[in-house]
Image: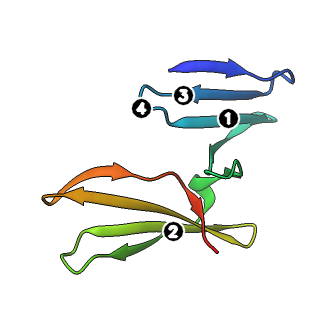
Amino acid sequence: MNTLFSAEGQRQTQRGTDGAAHVFIAGGAIGAALTPAADGVPLPLASLAQTLAYNPDGTVSYIQVTHAGTAYRQTLTYTDGNLTAVSAWEAQP
């Protein structure tokens, strides 16, 4: 992972080889892991309830969370029954 530090020295962004970014913000002795949504809003996924929606064949269609009154959805794509893509967290209208 590449690690980038902000000027404050308390925010750290790590980007994996798949391009996914994970932001860590130190808050006292314990830091909170945040994942940026497509619109740039940091989502505290570890503390949010997740809802799963299923396709007719039983595979997961999407995962949804709500943060600060906005629903965010991550959509899963399948090819020939195999998971081939997972979208960014997209704000829902």
- For the residue pair 25 and 83, the one nearer the viewer reads as 83
> Which element type, helix, strand or loop, lies under badge 1?
strand
Residue type of the residue flagged with mark 2: Gln
Residue type of the residue flagged with mark 1: Phe
Dot 1, how many residues are within 10 Å of its Cα: few (below 14), some (14-19), or many (20+)? some
Give me the residue at 74% from left, 36% from top. 25
| Disc nearest the viewer among 1 and 3 | 3
Q: Quadrant of residue 56?
A: bottom left
Could you tell which of marks 4 and 1 lies nearer the N-terminus?
Answer: 4
Could you tell which of marks 2 and 3 lies nearer the N-terminus?
Answer: 3
Residue type of the residue flagged with mark 4: Asp
Tell me the tag on residue 15: 3
The spot of residue 39 in percent (x, y) is 68, 52
| Disc nearest the viewer among 2 and 4 | 4
Give me the residue at 79% from left, 23% from top. 6
Q: Which residue is mark 1?
A: 24
Q: Which residue is mark 2?
A: 64
Estimate the spatial distance between the alpha carbons at disc 2 and disc 3, rounded to whole Å. Answer: 22 Å
Question: Residue reaching furthest right?
Answer: 8
Estimate the spatial distance between the alpha carbons at disc 1 and disc 3, rounded to whole Å. Answer: 11 Å
The spot of residue 81 in percent (x, y) is 15, 60
Estimate the spatial distance between the alpha carbons at disc 2 and disc 4, rounded to whole Å. Answer: 21 Å
